[in-house]
Image (tube, helix red, strand yellow):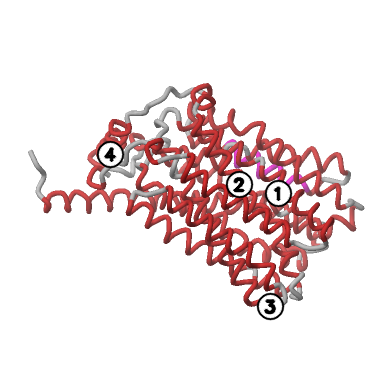
Amino acid sequence: MQTSPLTAHASAAADDALFRKITWRLIPLLFACYVFNYLDRTNVGYAQLQMKDQLGFADAVFGLGAGIFFIGYALFEIPSNLWMAKVGVRTTLLRIMGLWGLASASMVFVTTPTQFYVVRFLIGVFEAGFAPGVLFYLTLWFPSQRRAQVTALFFMGYSAAPIVAGPVAGLTMTYLNGVWSLQGWQWLFLLEGLPSVGLGLVAYCWLSNVPAQATWLSSAEKLRVQQVLEAEQAVNGTAQRATLGSALRDGRVWLLGFMSFLVILGIYALSFWQPTLMKSMGLSVLEVGIYSVIPAVVGIIATILIGHHSDQTGERRWHFAVSAIVGAVGLSLTPFFMRDAGIALACLSLAAAGISSAFAILWAVPGQFLSKQAAAAGIALITTVGGCAGVVAPVVVGYIKTATGGFTLSLYLLSGALVLSALLMLLALPRSALGRHVPREWA
């Protein structure tokens, strides 16, 4: 029996309302959690402005501390995500956020390089599994063609965090320095670490592990979500067993991991070096803090718009490839305008728009060929491979800057990485390898 257009339209509208309700329930809290994830991961970059003089740490100490964080993160990424698939997101976020928040706050007691290395390593261990865990969690609630937009909204926390990171760090380290015999950098770790513990408790109380357990959904709504997800699994017809071995044997998972690595090279390079790059344009420290907000805002807007369009069309490969190439163009044009801060800032904003959008689209791809059961291991593996860029990017850019005296060569290198990721998506990962797209009326 064929469904009438009027009935199909009403069903699509009802589904839109249902998944909008789910989005408003889950995403705001997960967004806030990701903001603090970024702050607790990167606040050492601001804190070192005072720690270096007060504790006598050399620049090499901070460089090694940054790398040790990602080593701990990579080692425990997959085990953490596999454990979450067994115990659920509520318990997992309580564990992850509680431990990373306490570890970050314990930085106030650091006085020696060894203590610094140990705490940074532990923060990486405790943070492991957060982002891929949330990505896996979203596969339990949203079908693939709706997932790009909610993924973009979640990752928007990573883009939004720099907007508050600089001002918060500057104000805290300036006006709380010496209060209650604590230095400004110690207050920074306390004020950005302890809220993460509180958010973990909120997540435990607010979130539901799966739709069937959601008391805020009616029985009919729970059934509809289950039908949509089961229809997608039936259409894809590519279910895999939920084992790490199945993910390790799937070449598409490794390929996406490598593409994630190429994109994250640009993300972390800009995260660590964009302030220095902007300062080299002749801007003051205050101007750097203010103007650095602009690329972040542009990245957020682009991510939302492109993620929404990708969901509406059901197309991933070209959305990713074009976004990555736009990011490459922005980075490669920046060196030509280093003496014109306005144009250079526009180039960095173009780069942020492309890189942020490509990163969000990339995470909607695994759900198109991985079953719900296999997604935990697959997403964790992709994140682990991509996360290695966190060790490579800051070191490589710093080495090139030391060797050449500028950022031109490193920006070209990062642009090449983005172009390569676009080519891999189009040429090495054909549409036939991603499973069949679920028709709109099924979701």
Which is more N-terminal, label 4 or label 3? Answer: 4
Cα–Cα gap, marks 2 and 1: 10 Å
Disc number for residue 262: 2
Cα–Cα gap, marks 3 and 4: 52 Å
Cα–Cα gap, marks 3 and 2: 28 Å
Helix or strand or loop: what does disc 3 sit on? loop
> Percent x, y for residue 200?
56, 43
Q: Which residue is mark 3?
A: 340
As drawn, is 213 to the left or to the right of 295?
left
Q: Residues within 10 Å of mark 4 (few under 14, many from 20)?
A: some
Q: Which residue is mark 1?
A: 393
Q: Amino acid at mark 1?
A: Ala
Q: Nearer the viewer, mark 4 or mark 2?
A: 2
Q: Nearer the viewer, residue 61 or 421?
A: 421
Disc number for residue 228: 4
Cα–Cα gap, marks 3 and 1: 26 Å
As drawn, is 403 to the left or to the right of 285?
right
Disc number for residue 64: none
Magenta span of residues: 95-107
Cα–Cα gap, marks 4 and 2: 33 Å
Q: Amino acid at mark 4?
A: Val
> Percent x, y for residue 74?
66, 35
Q: Residue at x 62, y 75 (%)?
A: 343
Which is more N-terminal, label 1 or label 3? Answer: 3
> Percent x, y for residue 109?
82, 46
Kindly check if marks 2 and 1 are in contact, taking CB atoms under 8 A apart as contact.
Answer: no
Q: Nearer the viewer, residue 140 or 70?
A: 70
